Amino acid sequence: MNRKNRLNRKNLKSGIVFASKAGDYVENRIGKAIENSRFKADDLPEKPEEMTWYRVPLEKGLSGDGSEYYIYVKLADPKKLCIFFSGGGVAWNEYTAARPVTGGKVASKQPNFYWNNLRPFTQIMNINVGITDIISDKNPFKDWSFVVITYATGDFHVGNNDYPFKTEDGGEDVLHFHGYVNFLESMKVSKALFPNPDTLLIAGNSAGAFAVPALAGEIADDYYPKTRNITLFSDSGQLLYKNWRKTAKHIWMAKESIWKPIHTDNITYDWYKDLYEKHGEKFRYLYSSSVRDYLLSAYYNDIVNRKYETDADVREEYYQQLKVMIDQLKELTPHFGMFMNEWKLPIITMGGTVHTSVREPHFTLFTQNGISMAEWLRDAVEGKVYDVGMELIR
């Protein structure tokens, strides 16, 4: 290696180290600011106030790194309940398990695949934004009751395993794929606080979008069998991988009824297909995506090319896969409502389009064909299901 190449490599390494330290510093500062402010959610008291977000620590819950686990709840209209599955990446093998998300990894663009704990910073991902915003009158779900099932296990909320892996520096660690246990404990809280809603929205973004079809049947059958008005909504849940069935069965150790329906590389379609075959038109079905999702395309690129980054080619592949999946979901039922968009955010989307919108400011602020996602979702839960942005995939 000549001197110039050595210098370039040294400069690159120094830049990565600097960006990593800067990213961790920013995350820590934001976390401390939340921790020490009036905006931090308190633990649920005996007599909670309405229209206030609270944390509910779950004794049997566990985050991926073994630390505490808690969910968020908001008491409002008891007849309108949203159970929301949070997103936060996925781990499907030892390599991804060894690379959880940190502010430093994000800033330095190093591989980072899932959140492995709940820390003060993660509050801003879970509440008071998009559909969980309790301030903006533009949010039609402002007055709904909520149970936000947080996510820090990397298993699409369906795992039940303690998975040993080697860390990046060669050490040994365990990833607690306890998403399903956390889900069960969360539903006990939901049923206790909100026993008889008339209207139920089961929604999720990113990793939580995959959980919706996997767990909606169980929610309806075991916890809310008397609720007839039920809408399901997955926001950005597409990631093709030929080994999903093996991952769910042997790595996450999901129960048989969850891994057995997986037959293709599209776990989202397989779970929706199984759900529809069992429940038919009992639910309203909704799906949304941007057409060239910058983040999901990066995950897919890592799966097929071992490159955790997005580029024009992989975004085009994502787009072609999206067209196929939308057709498949429409074949299940033509009443499957779609919201396609081409929204971009400077710098963040890196030439692609946004990743998820339901828990982002653009849930109410951006429009596609003059309609915001908030308006579309409000109409759907009221019984008016329709498509937006389908011209983008035709």
Image (cartoon, rainbow, N blue to C red):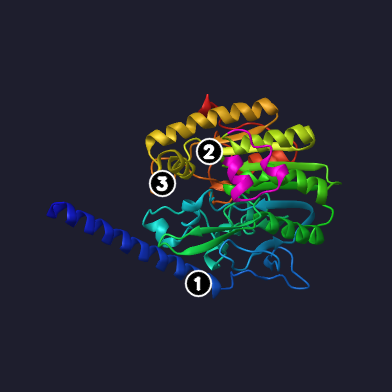
Q: Which residue is drawn at the image coordinates 53% and 38% (left, top)?
A: 241
Check if residue 341 falls in the magenta segment: no
Q: Which mark is residue 308?
A: 3
User: Residue 317: x, y in percent?
Assistant: 45, 32
Please report whichever mark, 3 or 2, sits nearer to the chain's N-terminal start. 2
Q: Nearer the viewer, residue 158 or 205?
A: 158
Cα–Cα span, label 3 and label 1: 31 Å
- Note whether 102 is above or below 232 in the view shown: below
Task: Tell me where residue 179 sits by quadrant.
Answer: bottom right
Please report whichever mark, 3 or 1, sits nearer to the chain's N-terminal start. 1
Check if residue 256 falls in the magenta segment: yes
Cα–Cα span, label 3 and label 2: 15 Å
Q: Which mark is residue 241?
A: 2
Magenta span of residues: 244-264
In terms of secondary structure, where does tag 3 sit? loop
Q: Which residue is mark 1?
A: 33
Q: Which mark is residue 120?
A: none
Q: Are marks 3 and 1 in contact (CB under 8 Å)?
A: no
In terms of secondary structure, where does tag 2 sit? loop
- Three-letter amino acid code of the residue under disc 1: Ala
User: Residue 246: x, y in percent?
Assistant: 59, 42
- Three-letter amino acid code of the residue under disc 2: Tyr
Q: Is 128 on the left-hand or right-hand side of 351?
A: right
User: Residue 306: x, y in percent?
Assistant: 40, 43
Task: Tell me where residue 148 sits by quadrant.
Answer: bottom right
